[in-house]
Structures are given as structure tokens and as C-alpha cells.
Image: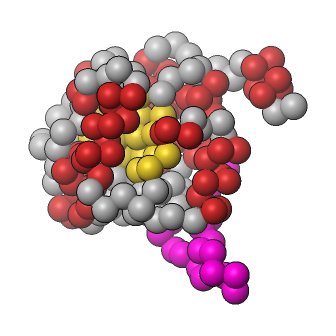
Amino acid sequence: MPNYNYKCRLHTIKAVVFDVDGVLTDGLIHSMPNGDLLRSFDSKDRMGLRMWILRRYPIGIITGGQTQSIEQFFRGLGLPENCLYQRSRKKLPDFLDFCQQNALEPHQVAYVGDDLPDIPVLEQCGLAVCPADAVPEVKAVCHYVSLYPGGRGCARDLIEQLLKVRGEWELDLDAYNEECR
């Protein structure tokens, strides 16, 4: 897909779906003594995710990983249970299930991925996005390559753009404070 003016697509997007490793994290995974795998998430990306969720827009996570820490992180953000797909080996069926669960067409959903398993979804979604450090094959099929690498602001970049074109890039402190109680 050519990287033509992706901003025209921002207005049509009603939901976002993210891969985890290499998109919401920098891709480094550390093995813990208890067998869990430790990932590092960026606080600015986390705030962007919260802003999207507070505005009541659908959000999904599709990852090949499966750990308690992934589940805890996203449940802590308020992600609905049916929007977290772990151990996903074929991501397109999970993406289509997310669309169906949220009464959306694929062209209404942005997807952010960074590696080869993400390509089938990137080719079907309405706005294909990747971090600056995605593999070349992924960059070649994306509408937008973020200026930020995975785990270092890529998610925030997309969400901020989506909310700004809607005039909604403003923190609702009452909702944020209520949600944090």
C-alpha cells in the first residue's frame, strides 16, 4: 500500500487494534524465575490507550504471547474481556471476530503491527499502521509508519491523531478520576 495521505482515513476509524510485542512494547522479553515473561510498556502509550477507552471507543489487543502480565496490564486499562486475544497464531480470524463483536466493518478499524504475522490484518483493515522500527515487509503494506518505535510512543501517536481529528484530544478529568477510584 502506498503511504499516501493516510490522514483522510482517520475520520472513518471507529476502533483500534494493537499487536503487543514490538508495538506496545519495545520487543524485548525477559524470562522471570516464575516462568512469566516480563514486558515493558511506555506510560505515554498507556495514557493514549486510556484516553481512547475513556471516550468509549472499541479497542482490541491481538498478540501471539500469553501471560498473566499481559492480561493484568490490559484489564487494568479497562479493556473488555472479549477484546483481548492471546496466543493468536493466525491474527486475521481474531481481527474479524473483534470486528463482529463490535458491529464494525474491517475498513472502520485501524490495526498496528510490526512483524510478518501482522501482514494479513494490515492488508484488510481500514488504516494500516506500524512503528518506525517495524520490519520492511510490514512498512511496505502500511498506510502510515509512525515516527515512534514500538513501545516508545507509537500507540500514543496514532490515538492522539485519531482523537485530535474528532476534537476529542482533551482529558476528561472527572471521568479519569472516577475511573481511577
Q: Residue furthest right?
A: 181
> Vertical placement of 72 versus 89: above or below?
above
Residue visible at 32% across and 28% down in the picture: 100
Picture quarter containing residue 11?
Answer: top left
Circle count = 0
Residue 47 placement: quadrant: top right
Residue 113 visible: yes
Visual colour scheme: secondary structure
Image position, residue 49 (x, y; %): 58, 38
Task: Please state the horizontal and vertical placement of residue 74, each as a whole percent of the image.
Answer: 61, 47
> Can residue 48 be seen from the camera position used here?
no
Judge by depth and name the residue closer to the eye, 167 or 68: 68
Give the residue drawn at x 12%, y 42%. 2
Q: Residue at x 54, y 75 (%)?
A: 29
Q: In the rendered view, does 161 fall on the left or right side of 96?
A: right
Q: Which quadrant holds the N terminus?
A: top left
* Residue 116 falls left or right of residue 177: left
Q: Give the range drawn in magenta.
A: 26-43
Can you say which quadrant of the picture contains the C terminus? top right
**Residue 75 position in % (x across, y down):** 65, 44
Q: Position of residue 20 (x, y in %)?
A: 47, 57
Quick check: is 119 in the magenta stretch?
no
Q: Residue furthest bottom?
A: 33
Left or right of 174? Residue 26 is left
User: Which residue corresponds to the image point at 65% horizontal and 52% vertical from the top-left?
Assistant: 73
User: Which residue ends up furthest to the left in the rendered image?
Assistant: 1
Q: Is residue 47 above or below residue 147?
A: above
Give the main secondary structure of the magenta stretch: loop
